[in-house]
Image (spheres, rainbow, N blue to C red):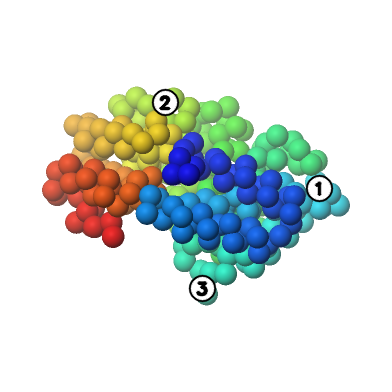
Amino acid sequence: SEKSYYCGYGFYHGFMETLFQREEDMDQARRFCEYADQELRRTTSDAGGACYHGIGRGAVDGSDPRSWGNPKAMIKAGLALCELVSNDENPPPRYGKLYRCVSGVFNGLEILSTQSKYRLSINKDDPFWVCENTEERYKEACFTQFVVAVINITGNDFVKSAMIIDTIKEESYAIPSLQALVVELVNKGRTNYEETINFCRNLSARFRIPCTSAFAEGFLKYGPPEKEYVQAINFCNSNLLTDNEKISCFDKVLSLLRIWYTADKSYSICMEVEQKYRWGDCNYN
């Protein structure tokens, strides 16, 4: 169904986890993801990616009980499975099938650790320790998924969470992680424009512009079905933003529209934006 993208593609999380745990059939899981991608490609560009993410989650939540309590052992089989099932070109694209599947592996590990299931727990002194000790090709997916663990450790204190993320030296991991944090502001109902802009502008210089655009992305991710773009566009149009912040904001929102909408609807939304802020000439084909 076209509605399967609702609630952050949660359908695929539950469906693929259960399918994989019951059948343990890699080929069937891959075939279903390819089917979903083909069926819904006109409506959304991310059904297949969300499906592969679900495979990764299912691989961890259904891991061998003999590995419980050992995070590295629990994700080992899941990462190997992702390498097999994704069948990406080499090197894999940044947000291709492998990335999405691997992100599911680390998402599953983070959830189980936060819930203290399977003899797991979060390392409150070093919540990113798993990420720091994983292969380079998996690190970004790991860091961004463990941001939720950081939020829980700080008791939903986003300033403290940002400080922890700022300890990540590599910008290629730190910036996406900071953006993953800010997206969750919307999930927590903290949608005051002025407060968020002040929060962003008080961060380290490398985070300031990415922070404001991530807030807009949060409205897309957590907005009401079929109208996700409304608050995102409203924020990007805010007079509280500088021109550079607006450019980054619209680039982020407009470039992501195809995840939620058809090419025609994405084009229509894009064309309503002031011309100088339009992304890619509003070409979604």
Q: Amino acid at mark 2?
A: Arg
Distance from label 3 to label 2 (Cα)?
Answer: 40 Å
Foreground residue among 30 and 162: 30
Contact? badges 1 and 2 (CB < 8 Å):
no
Distance from label 1 to label 2 (Cα)?
Answer: 36 Å
Task: Give the secondary structure at mark 3.
Answer: loop
What number is the disc on residue 190? 2
Q: Is residue 27 visible?
A: yes
For disc 1, the marked residue is: 68
Eyeballing the image, is 185 above or below 135?
above
Q: Disc 3 vs disc 1: which is toward the camera? A: 3
Contact? badges 3 and 1 (CB < 8 Å):
no
Foreground residue among 166 and 10: 10
Q: Amino acid at mark 1?
A: Trp
On the rendered structure, is 100 left or right of 246?
right
Contact? badges 3 and 2 (CB < 8 Å):
no
Closer to the chain start, of discs 3 and 2, is 3
Q: Disc 3 vs disc 2: which is toward the camera? A: 3
Percent x, y of residue 191? 37, 26
Indicate the quadrant containing the C terminus: top left, top right, bottom left or bottom right.
Answer: bottom left
Q: Residue furthest left?
A: 275
On the rendered structure, is 217 left or right of 236?
right
Percent x, y of residue 166? 48, 45
Q: Residue at x 54, y 40 (%)?
A: 10
Distance from label 3 to label 1 (Cα)?
Answer: 32 Å
Q: Amino acid at mark 3?
A: Glu
Report crowding for label 1: few under 14, some 14 to 19, many 20 or more residues within 10 A (C-alpha).
Answer: some
Q: Residue at x 69, y 52 (%)?
A: 20
Percent x, y of residue 178? 45, 44
Q: Quadrant of residue 25?
A: bottom right
For disc 3, the marked residue is: 89
